[in-house]
Amino acid sequence: MSSAGGDTIVLKNGRRITAETVTEDAEHVTYLTPAGQLSLPKSIVARIEKDDFGYSSASHSSEPPVSAPEIEPVRGYEDVAALAVHDNQIDFGYIARLESDARSGGATGVAKVAAAHYAAAQFLVGKGDTNTAIDHYREALAFAPDNAGLLLNLAVLYLRQSQFTAALDPLERARRLQPDSADVAKLMGWAYYGANKMDRAIEEWQRALKLRPDAEVKAALEKAQRDKAEEESYREGETAHFDLKYNGSATPDLARGILRALEDDFRDLESQLDYTPVESIPVILYTEQGFADITRAPGWVGALNDGRLRIPVQGLTHVTPELAHVLKHELTHSFVGQKSHNRAPTWLQEGIAQWMEGRRSSSDAGALMDAAGRGLAPSLAAMDGSWMGLSGNAAAFAYAWSLAVVESIIDAGGVGDISRLLDRVASAPSTEIALRETLRLGYDDLNQQTIAYLKRAYLR
Ligand SMILES: [Zn+2]
């Protein structure tokens, strides 16, 4: 028995999402999670596996892309069929006798076994028992391994169950027997299409059309070609510097916009920080609920970078100026993290990330100088570690101070000083030692430099 695990949404990238109450409309697959309702664009969903043995799929594979050809494995054995299935049941005794006769040899005996199992399988399919029908074809094939009709009928049942890989085995055997069969090519196309191997599906359906004109195959081929184009745009990011995954509702347009923005940011950061990350950077787009659920971050966290750029995008359809800031900010964390071998303290990370996204201290300068004047300038050492325990106000102050510190460093020596500092942080025993070695400043000196900078730059 299956547990109450719910249905499984299988994405084209192979990821599996277990969810409850999966529904679909023309464009989205929607499901419930403990964090609320999430939806995925259908274009990234390969199929939905229902919790029971039944099967239902989303997007293109919700219906078979082509119909199953009617193929009789043997002809002229209507009498055998009538004896194998009668009175609304299968006569197993009769089939056993046919099998026993067939074992003692003879083509006719084998043909009769094939006809009997075919009749039994047809009867079971009519009753919805596909699994047992499959068993009958397999038994028949033990006697008649070269019967292409049996192989194709078996393949069709696998295809209807979305067992695409299983379907390929009988189809390949059938192709060896009948290399020029349009039916084999048509069904192979179905198998590859279902398995999300668009190139192979297109190949097979083109082959099928050459062998025999077929409006249905032509329509399926055109759809496969469209799907392939869509998928190529989706994988665009996986081949460049980013590996983008959708998690939650996001449109392909938004995803492409995000990738374009990230590539621009990447080039800019590469030259500013004199560094190129070696690994491609994973990016995950979240709805807000999904983001809070998965990251368990405090409410003030807008996006996260824990090696993956986790970006909430709920409700967005394109890259807004705010989102552009978030992307640059989070990508900066990847550069800083990798360049410093993940040893950059939080204040340095957040200071650089804010500076790179284009933020400056102007609006906060007054409040920062005020706090410093009252002896409340924060200790950088205290801001080295994680900020996840900070309240919203304390976090806002920590961000503002960190930005001012980084601004003062860049004001004094340019972005090159940040780059040299990060290189040193990667191997120095502590950030403060790295700071002394590169900028000849301790933490207290740096705070003093920051206060002087704020006065000079912003006090009028
Ligand atoms: Zn940050």
Image (spheres, helix red, strand yellow):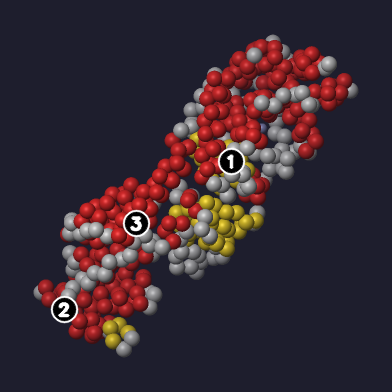
The residue mark sitting in front, 3 or 2, is 3
The CA distance from mark 1 to mark 3 is 32 Å
Task: Give the structural element (helix, strand or loop) at label 1.
Answer: loop
Task: Give the structural element (helix, strand or loop) at label 3.
Answer: helix
Task: Give the structural element (helix, strand or loop) at label 2.
Answer: loop
Q: Which mark is residue 132?
A: none
User: Which residue sits at x=77%, y=33%?
Assistant: 396
Towards the viewer: 379 or 314: 314
Q: Residue 77 in the image: state x and y as whole percent.
A: 18, 79
Instruction: State whether label 3 is within 8 Å of ligand 1.
Output: no
User: Which residue sits at x=33%, y=86%?
Assistant: 88
Towards the viewer: 71 or 295: 71
The CA distance from mark 3 to mark 2 is 35 Å
Q: Amino acid at mark 1?
A: His
Towards the viewer: 22 or 429: 22
Sooner in the amino-acid sequence: mark 3 or mark 2: 2
Q: Residue 205 in the image: state x and y as whole percent.
A: 29, 54
Q: Which mark is residue 318?
A: 1
Instruction: State whether label 2 is within 8 Å of ligand 1.
Output: no
In the image, is 422 to the left or to the right of 203?
Answer: right
Where is 167 relative to 130, above or below?
above
In the image, is 369 to the left or to the right of 342?
Answer: right
- The answer to the question of whether label 3 and label 2 lie on touching residues, with beta carbons closer than 8 A, is no
Q: Which residue is mark 3?
A: 219
User: Which residue sits at x=24%, y=58%?
Assistant: 213
Q: Residue 274 in the image: state x and y as whole percent.
A: 54, 19
Q: Which mark is residue 76?
A: 2
Instruction: State whether label 1 is within 8 Å of ligand 1.
Output: no
